[in-house]
Image (cartoon, helix red, strand yellow):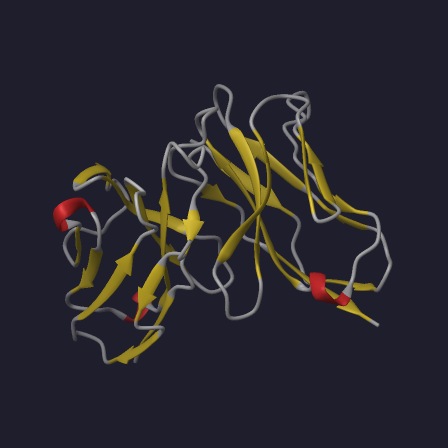
Amino acid sequence: EAGVAQSPRYKIIEKRQSVAFWCNPISGHATLYWYQQILGQGPKLLIQFQNNGVVDDSQLPKDRFSAERLKGVDSTLKIQPAKLEDSAVYLCASSSRLSKNIQYFGAGTRLSVL
Amino acid sequence: GNSVTQMEGPVTLSEEAFLTINCTYTATGYPSLFWYVQYPGEGLQLLLKATKADDKGSNKGFEATYRKETTSFHLEKGSVQVSDSAVYFCALSPFAGGGNKLTFGTGTQLKVEL
C-alpha cells in the first residue's frame, strides 16, 4: 500500500512570510498527526486529528500555526507569519485501529526560515 | 508529564559489534513503548514495540524489553551492520493500545564502520 505522502520536501522562506505543507495519509487511516522536529531533538506533536475533528492541539502555537483536515483525508498545516525558530522538519503521520494504532510517518518537509 | 530520556550520540561501532542504546521513561499508568529508526533522507519507521511490562519487542535482529521496575526500554543488537547506521528514537504512547500522541526522546545517531 502507498505510504504517507508529504509535499513539498523542502521549503526556504524569509521570516514573516507564510508557508503551507500538505499531507496525504495512508488510505483508510482515520487518525492524522503533525509533528515538528527541530534539529537535534525528537519530534513533538503539534496537532492530532480523528477524521476531520481535532483531538489534541495543545502544543500548536495558534497565533501563527493553523491546520485543517477537510473531508477527513488530506491535511494542510500553515504557518503565518513564520519566525526563525520555526526552522524544522514537519512530519505527518497516520494510523488506524486496523493497523493496531501504529503511526506511519511520511518523509517530512524541511523548512528553513531565513 | 510524560518524558523519554535516551543516551546521547553519536555512537560509533565497528561492524559485528554489540549495540546497546539506553532509554528510560517517565509516565503514569501503563504506556506503550516504541523504537523508531530514521535512515538518512527518510521518514521515521517503526522498528519494534512493546505494550506491557516484560514484553520483548524484536525486529531485524534488534530487541528491547519493557522493564517497568526500572522504567527502561533499552535497544540491543548482537551484531551490527553498516546498513544499521541511522538515528534511533525511543518513544512512548500513554495508552496500552498505542493510539495516541507519541512522546519521543532526542534520538541517538548510530554510525557503523567497516
Q: Position of residue A93 (x, y in %)?
A: 37, 50
Along the horizontal axis of the image, is B17 left or right of A104?
Answer: right
Q: Position of residue B65 (x, y in %)?
A: 70, 31
Quadrant showing the C terminus of chain B: bottom right
Along the horizontal axis of the image, is A12 left or right of B85?
Answer: left
Q: Position of residue B73 (x, y in %)?
A: 65, 35
Of all residues, the one furthest to the front in this rendering is A1
Q: On screen, A102 above or below B51?
A: below
Marks counted in the figure total 0
Q: On screen, A19 above or below B78?
A: below
Quadrant showing the N terminus of chain B: top left
The residue shown at (43%, 44%) is A103
The residue shown at (36%, 73%) is A9
Along the horizontal axis of the image, is B47 left or right of A28?
Answer: right
The residue shown at (70%, 49%) is B60
Along the horizontal axis of the image, is B92 left or right of B21?
Answer: left
Q: Position of residue A17 (x, y in %)?
A: 16, 75
Q: On screen, A23 above or below B99?
A: below
- Dividing the picture into quarters, in which one does residue B100 lie? top left
